[in-house]
Image: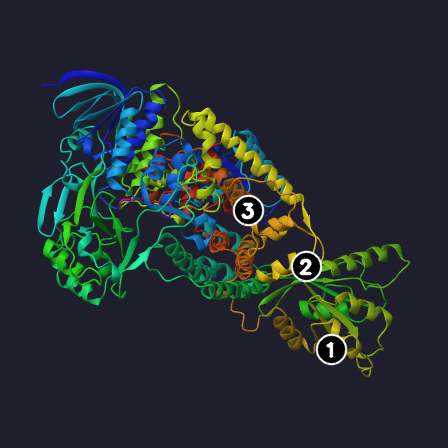
Amino acid sequence: MSTVAAISTPRAQGGISVIRISGEDALSAADRIFKPLSRNILPSEMEGYTCAYGKIVNGSEVLDDGVLTVFRAPKSYTGEDVVEISCHGGIFVTEQILRLILDGGIKAAGAGEFTKRAFLNGKMSLTQAEAVMDIISADGNAGLRCAESLREGALFRRIKKVSDGMLKLLGSLAAWVDYPDDDIPAVEEYEISAVLEAGIADLDKLLSSYESGRIVREGADTAIVGRPNVGKSTLMNLLAGCERSIVSDTAGTTRDVVEESVRLGDIVLRLSDTAGIHDTDDTVESIGVDRARKKLDAADLILAVFDAGSEITSEDRELAEKCRGRNAIAVLNKSDLEHRFDFSEISDCFKDNVTVSAEKGEGLERLVSAVEKLYGMTGFAPDMGVLSNERQRSCAERARLCFREALDALKAGATFDAVTILIDDGENSLLELTGEKASEAVVDEVFSRFCVGK
Amino acid sequence: MSHYIDSYDVAVIGAGHAGVEAALAAARLGAKTVMFTISLDNIANMPCNPSIGGTAKGHLVREIDALGGEMGKAADACFIQSRMLNRGKGPAVHSLRVQADRVKYHNHMKKVCEMQENLDVKQAEVTEILTENGTVTGIVTHLGGEYRVKTAIIATGTYLKGLIHVGDVSYESGPDSTLPARGLSDSLRGLGINLRRFKTGTPSRVHRRSIDFDKLEIQHGDGDIQPFSFETPREGLENIVLCYVAYTNEETHKVIRENIHRSPMYSGRIEGIGPRYCPSIEDKIVRFSERPRHQLFIEPMGLDTEEFYLQGMSSSLPEDVQIAFLRTIKGLERVEIMRNAYAIEYDCCDPQDLRHTLEFKNIRGLYGAGQFNGTSGYEEAAAQGLVAGINAARYCKGEEGITLSRSSSYIGTLIDDLVIKGCLDPYRMMTSRSEYRLLLRQDNADERLTPLGYEIGLISEERYKLFHVKQLQIKQEIARVKAKTLSPTAELNKLLTEKGTAEISTGVKMSDLIRRPQISYEDLKPFDAKRPELPYEVREQVGLQIEYEGYIERQLAEVEHVKKLENKRLPQPFDYNEIKGLSLEAQEKLNRVQPENIGQASRISGVSPADVSVLIIWLAARK
């Protein structure tokens, strides 16, 4: 296999960037560009798990200085000879160094290439590879526990329960068909439907927790919306625990979408404090309002802020309508003024409501528990095994659909051979989910989610 | 000293159900063919059950016929009772099974072989295969006769180093007290072929007058008989005999349990591995101890004999125990055994040494077929014989061998299972072995295979034309039915209500009504004024293809999906130890089987999905 290289740290300004080279020619490639300072020893002469400080050079030109670490096959991430060069962060310099390496005849690594090689060299299993991706991108403790539980097989066990039931059913159907002379009891319709219904119910539970699982892993895209000056930014600052948005009494101060990630209990909220949604003639401000509206449409979670001290307005009603059917919580922001907001008029647009005083920092606990309740986090144990990515979800979804079709066909009076085909199909989807059945789609899907350098 | 006798293109060793199909196919394709048998009086013998077909086996016979083989026609000519099994369980699993007249079947097949142009039938035991540079060049018989041949097909059934066991008595023998084939095994081992021991069993034959038929359940044949062969007319077929059902009881089981230590299977005298799916009665009683009774079928051996066969009661217990346990069964209290039950052990190859053409991987021109390849059953044997015969003839002409895919047929599934997965016990075909059951129905075997049979040269021009007419009629009628709308008349709604399905209030496509499980194509005839007069076989296809269209499309999509993996070709030969990510077991199995593509690799037991993923990525990375 050819030797490949890529920048393994995020492509952003930072203190340090790491370039990884993996393959047979990794060490000779390093020899060409790295001049060790203190010891007169080339990278190709270094032992595994040793490092050297030196200069990264293009002929006589010095590009940077850095630390080079050598990993010798098979004791490396990929199982091949690996060289990692830690240089000074900075997109320009790092990319220059990478280009220098590639110019020496090394290939650029494709997405997920290093992990693919690790996988090919027996360094990890496919499900481990998948979990690696989830761990890399997991925010928060619950997310990490989710990813770990996938590796350790909690999800596997839940799926296994359903697929074992189906396998047993398919087994009795097969025996009954293949041994008509053997006095084998006929499989009755009610037995088939009982197994199918139980399987569908289990998949229902699993699929409904997908949302919780996804929110735990990826966090909830949260839009804080409301009329201008009802206290959105104050709420955001309260949530974030620091002042980020500019707070002023003049309506329309927040002109852009400010983003912030905060931990609320087990859930990470990616907050967007939006410009107040109201009609405006100010061009600059209207861009902000427009973006706020879009943000509202795309959000996982809407925190609609209302001023408890004023009467309900038409803008409030309009906003409430937009929240109907969404994961929306009404936040009634209490001021010192008396409570004049008639929430009951719009209450059916919201999943829940809490009263807070953003300025005084009161009511945060109530908001946390409302959000957790909304995502079914009460009683949600992330290590009980959840579907944690789109591939797994679509397999479970397809299996459920097949079992439902089988149940419908059975009830409509279809012959068992046809029903069996549908159960077979569903079973195959479950086996694909757990990795017990290989398909190209699974492999592609798993590795396509890796970014270059991983 | 050996002496030269003659030269042939194809030599078939054995004249059982595999050998006969192989010899006929090769000869019909123009190869100069010789078929050897230890006894001419045992050609196409049925030493076990005198029946042809059964679940999935019936499918095989229909497929053999659709490709141009002989078994279906012979069964149609010699059956004495016919039944379509699984009628209530859906068209995918309908399976035809007939009771054949055993002597008549043998005589019929012997005559067919004798009359076949290009085919010589000879009584001799083949003891040696001659090769040069890994290619077959000849065979030698026990009398020292040497034949120069280009190919040899081994179809030795249970004869190869045959050893019969009854209780503590064992003796060298072929089935039914014939001579065993003693010499060939050593020659095969010398060629580097892995041999192993399998065993199978057969029940006793009893005298008609010792059975109290009054105490037994009668099993009738079908009123409306469907023949096996697509060429046999449906008219004039009839059942001649009745079969009977009896049951073992606690007393039977007690006798067997008390004497189990005298069974050579349990005392360890038999080393061969028996069929899991066709167990002896003692096996059934030990393995399914909770079952209070087991069924047995009492079937006549033919019209010119008083012998009856006890299906389901094969045994290797001693003679006195056999008599004792049979006499505990209601209706068999005074039973007289004419031929006792026995177990037989024999040498067979490991089919993983074979290609999909059934040629040995390491010896050009050498083929295996039937029980020698590790299967059990006449139909499985015949199917392989046909494929081996076709490929041996093609090899002689310098043509590429044919292989059948899993999605084309049960024959293809059978061979793929054998060659890729191998078998640890005698392999029996079952409908559950096919993932494409709804495509591989017994009723559409001609649609699936007759074009190939024609292309190969085993289907006559005349038959092929008739086949085309049938397919055209099916296509046209389906198109007509799909375009036709039925109005909601009182009569139609009356029918729908009677059949237990919803009435219609507006015009509905006739095909939509047929898709309702309660309504058939035939049911709607009174409401379909312009329906043409069509033969039964066409009407059957129209009904099935419309009713199961959704399921058929689903299976076709799966076929396409799997094809993607089949199209990913693996290098051959290849040392899989080079791919470090594979498990040790997978490396070993892949090195042994040397699969042609990822699809095949994924079916090898011991190659896990994770290993398959490794192969997929490895293959992609290689490019």
Numbered marks: total: 3
Q: Is residue A244 shown above or below B209?
A: below
Colour scheme employed for the rendering of this structure: rainbow
Magenta part of the protein: which range?
B50-56
Amino acid at pointer 3:
Gly
- Checking the image for residue A357, the label placed there is 1
Q: Residue B338: x, y in percent?
A: 14, 49
* Chain bearing mark 1: A
Q: Secondary structure at mark 1?
A: loop
- Name the kind of residue labelled 2 in the image: Ala
Task: Report the disc number at residue A309.
Answer: none
Marks 2 and 3 in Cβ contact (< 8 Å): no
Which of A369/A200 is in front?
A: A200
Report, in whole angstroms, how far the alpha carbon at label 2 lies from the one at label 3: 24 Å
Report which residue position mark 3 lands on: B543
Is B547 situated left or right of A43 in this image? right
Residue A37, position as x, y percentages in the image? 48, 38
B540 left or right of A315 in image: left
